[in-house]
Image (cartoon, helix red, strand yellow):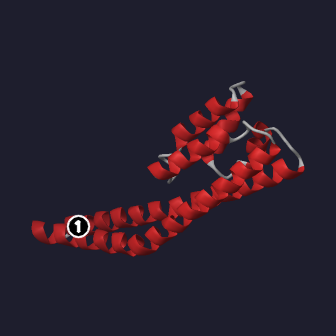
Amino acid sequence: MTGTLLLIAVGTLAGYMESHRLEMRVERLEEFLRFVSSAQTEIRFSALPVEQIVQRHGGDLEFLRRCGDCFEKGTDFLSAWQTGVNSCAKNSGFNEKDTELLKGFGRGFGVSDIDGQLSHCALYCELTAQSLKDAKEEKERKSRLYQMFGVFSGMAAALLLC
């Protein structure tokens, strides 16, 4: 009896973990969109260097904190950005498409004049908003499905073993 309940619990937990992964992706994309918007505002009104913008507004995202740590060690921006994205993107809820979006933003951030940076931020606001919309739609479609599939697969495994 205990084994049966454990199988059902494990299936249920697996379903909820997949559902949580979808929710986490939505949250991280929202945080990144806020960062890009804040960066755009900082560039427009204060013309701060990109390293300071990342350190100032990147506290919500793990990869931006890692990027800031690399700056403190004297790493250049692009290397620090790539290190931050590569070290944290997979564990923080981003999928491969999102990771490429982050890398693309880093490659163009801080390499042109103020107007170019404003355009770059505006472009990535749009791209991130589209990814966020897709992530929300995926969450709506699949979240409940994963939860139910987990419960039912746990029950099926328990029935097969009884």
Q: Amino acid at mark 1?
A: Thr
Mark yes or no: residue 162 visible: no
Question: Can you give x and y, in whole percent of width and height, for residue 46 in the image?
Answer: 89, 47
Q: Secondary structure at mark 1?
A: helix
Residue 61 versus residue 132 in the image, above or below? above
Residue 150 can be seen, yes or no: yes
As drawn, the residue found furthest toward the right would be 46
129 left or right, relative to 110: left
Q: As drawn, is 14 to the left or to the right of 31?
A: left
Which residue is tagged 1?
Answer: 2
Indicate the quadrant containing the N terminus: top left, top right, bottom left or bottom right.
Answer: bottom left
Residue found farthest to the top: 74
Residue pictured at 11% horizontal, 66% vertical: 161
Q: Nearer the viewer, residue 116 or 33?
A: 116
Who's the residue at 89% across and 51% down the image?
45
Give the quarter of the figure containing the C terminus.
bottom left
In front: 51, or 63? Answer: 51
Horizontally, residue 147 falls left or right of residue 36, namely left
Left or right: residue 75 versus residue 136 is right
Q: Position of residue 6 (x, y in %)?
A: 26, 65
Q: Nearer the viewer, residue 161 or 60?
A: 60
Q: Which residue is found at the position 84% from the left and 41% from the top?
A: 48
